[in-house]
Image (cartoon, rainbow, N blue to C red):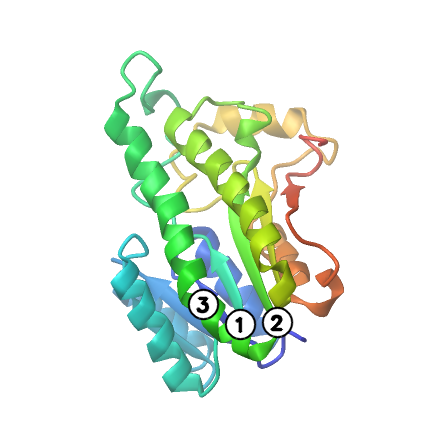
Amino acid sequence: MRIENTIVLVTGGARGLGEHLSRAFAREGARVVVNYHSSEERARSLVRELGEDKVIAVRADVTDAGQVQQMVALAQDHFGAPITVAVNNALVDFSFNGDARPSLENLAAEDLSQQFTGAVVGGLNVIQAVVPGMRRSGHGRIINIGTNLFQNPVVPYHDYTAAKAALLSLTRTAAKDLGALGITVNMISGGLLRTTDASAATPAEVFDAIAAGTPLGRVTSPEEFADTALFFASDWSRGVTGQNLVVDGGLVMD
């Protein structure tokens, strides 16, 4: 399986890291399904820029299983073939806003539930929707977007970090369950990326502290992170599943 002409779904693919993921796959010749929830104009603009013959934008709330099933069916009808690469990137109502985050003292169950629903339930909805097509194709790649914050909580974003840790567990159990079908399931984890929509509220001193503790001496860019997804989507990763690759310039070595 090569990336060229592969049908790739990127959830939350119109803005932030998702936009960079969509761009990276389109650059390599994939046919890209740009999922969005509320960023319709940005999604439409991205489609026009990358080419309407290769990229489509589809609205769906990843936490709604029915909408996800409809999105996957629409993409298959449009391209005439199933999605064989799915990137679970959508970030539900979250900003890396430093000191404005909920502290442990005032963290509410609703905060945890919201992030768990977005990351884990949303990821599960996508996996369940794309696996039948991958099964028919005899291969598939599922790439979940994680974080290095549960290994190195530079800033303790309790709700977001706990949800991504749970998504890593789902990554590994899904890899075990789907391997016999030729489907790999992996995670790519970055730290704060410089800069995306979600990290734009991060104080400069936090970025500086991260860069100072990183062997490469800088904060990872979203372009660098997105390029790593190309490996997991390609034949070159066919022997890798259930793994969490940390892409943060060496800040976390695990």
User: What residue is disc 1 on?
Assistant: 134
The span from disc 3 to disc 1 (Cα, nearest Å) is: 6 Å
> Which label number is shown at residue 139?
2
Q: Secondary structure at mark 1?
A: helix
Q: Position of residue 35 (x, y in %)?
A: 36, 64
In percent of the image, x 45 and y 52: which residue is there? Answer: 89
Q: Position of residue 56 (x, y in %)?
A: 38, 77
Q: Which residue occupies the foreground of this view, 82 or 4?
A: 82
Amino acid carrying mark 1 in the image:
Met
Left/right placement of residue 2 relative to residue 156 reads right
- Is residue 46 placed above or below 216 in the rendered structure? below
Q: Position of residue 145 (x, y in %)?
A: 51, 48
Q: Which is more N-terminal, label 1 or label 2? A: 1
Q: Position of residue 68 (x, y in %)?
A: 32, 64
Which quadrant of the structure image shows residue 42?
Answer: bottom left
* Residues tagged 3 and 1 counted as in contact (Cβ below 8 A): yes
User: What residue is disc 3 on?
Assistant: 130
* Residues tagged 2 and 1 counted as in contact (Cβ below 8 A): yes
